[in-house]
Amino acid sequence: MSTITSELKKGALVNLIGVIGKMAAPTFLIVVNRLYGAEVFGIYITTNIAIEIIIAFLTSGFKDGALIFVSKFSSDSDGAKQLYQALSNSFAWSIGLSLLTLIGFFWFGEFFLSIFYEENFSNYLVIMFQFMIFSIPLMAFERIVLAATQGLKIMKYDALNNGWLRPLSLLIFSILFWYIDSSFTGLALAYLSTQLLLFIISLVIFSKELSWKKLFTACKNFEINKELVGFAIPQNINMTLNRFITGIDILMLPLFGFGPKIIGFYGAGTMLIREIRSIKLIFSSAFSPHIVRLHHKGEFNELSKHFSSTSSWIATLSIPTILLMAIFKDWLLIIISPDFNISSSFMFFLLPIPYLYCSFSLAGNVVAMTGHSKLILLNSITVASLNFLFNYLLIPKFGLQGAALSSSIAMFILVSLELIEARYVASTVLRVKDIYRPHLVGLLCLFIIFITQMFFPSFSKTLEWQILMSMIIVGLFLILRTNKKLLST
């Protein structure tokens, strides 16, 4: 076993522990919908997506830049100056822009929201924003600290913060604040309290793994790092558009007359689907530092090898999870909210998103980590524009199904572009012979589900059928992973 494979598995194991902690996220969905109601949750998820888009715009490029510079210079005895110069730039730009965003919201936020949404909806959003907006500079600091530790190949802190503490804290605070205020304000304060806790923990992490003295020295002798800024600004815009691509459906539904309750139901479905994407993060966070090093050394064949094997691992875990989600979707939505009273068919149109993301979007990490931020920015501009157009055309005609289908089409276009660029720009190839087996078995499982639903429609709606199908899927994939003749990655 190669050193890189061993390190990838160790890093992935740490990240897996973090993803297990994220099991609190579905619990959060259940608790919030049952305590606060689907209407409050609908406003919350709309605000949350907007906050994530803003934080992506302010920090994503600087976060990735911090990871890249720390990866490059942490092993260099003479690299401390460049390392902390990059960190000082990352902190200064992202936190400074965050503070400007706070000022801008309190001057223009209410007016801006009233332009796009009807009065009642925008008033609810303002209530949420006036508390949740304060989390942005806290999140900016935390994300850069975690990226820096990943650059040091320390994965446990990201797993701890994002895998365990964030979902668990949000769950606990949402329950505590419900006793104080069961309205929009209580949930907004729970969100802000969570970010404040994580900010404090990130201060401790920085103190343990990095040097405040060296950071302050770099800040005192501050110089604009043109290489970092040149990478970060287009990457910021790219990741903003990337988040916009995956959240525009929820942001646009209110524009076409869908109320908070319906958006809450749809949002619960999208959050369930989105949790599947965490499977990719188990491996991609551990893989990113190796992308930088292998590409920098010109070891393209080795990079392609690990790119393909890692993609195969991700697909092997994500495909059965997606199929299980398809089988149990109705039960899951009812558990989240007993008041769920709309068709869950929109979930089928959302499922291609985690499939494409988990199976192929590691190519986007390759393109980004090899410094081609301007190229992936062009991808995001193109796909975001198309996704906006798809939603504009399909939501009025098909409702929730149209919103879900628009996002799936956009994801297909995005991963297609990233795969092409990984091959021809970053000289990194996704080898079909190394990845096809989990997809083939997934197709077989899908065929079995389809046949039973077609010929035994009444039975296929029962819990007995759902349990039987889940056992078949899990069994096939256990065989797939343990039999080297069927799958050798």
Image: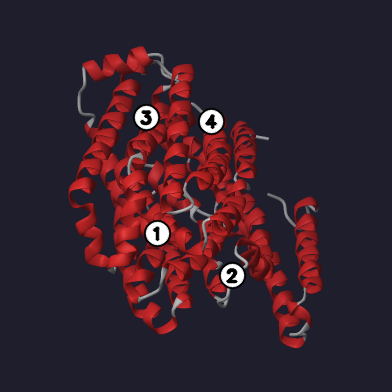
Residue 53 visible within the image: no
Which amino acid lies under the numbered mark 4 shown in the image of this protein? Tyr
Report whether residue 406 is seen.
Answer: yes
- Horizontal and vertical percent position of residue 407: 44, 68
- Find disc 3 in the rendering and name its residue: 69
Q: Nearer the viewer, residue 420 or 129?
A: 129
Residue with the mark numbered 2: 339
Amino acid at dot 2: Asp
Which element is circle 3 on?
helix
Estimate how packed mark 1 is, as few (under 14), some (14 to 19) or many (20 or more) residues with alpha carbons within 10 Å: many
Of marks 4 and 2, which one's residue comes earlier in the chain? 4
Q: Is residue 383 above or below residue 422?
A: below
Viewer-side residue, 342 vs 317: 342
**Which residue occupies 25% across, 20% down?**
219
| Residue of label 1 | 46
Sequence-wise first label, 3 or 2: 3
Image position, residue 361 (x, y; %): 48, 55
Task: Tell me: 219 left or right of 207.
Answer: left
Residues packed near mark 4 inside 10 Å, few (<14), some (14 to 19) or many (20 plus): many
Residue farthest to the front?
180
CA–CA distance between discs 4 and 1? 28 Å
Q: Where is mark 4, residue-wise? A: 157
Q: Tags 4 and 2 in contact by the CB under 8 Å rule?
A: no
Label 4 close to label 1 by CB (< 8 Å): no
Q: Nearer the viewer, residue 262 or 123?
A: 123
**Residue type indicated by callout 1:** Thr
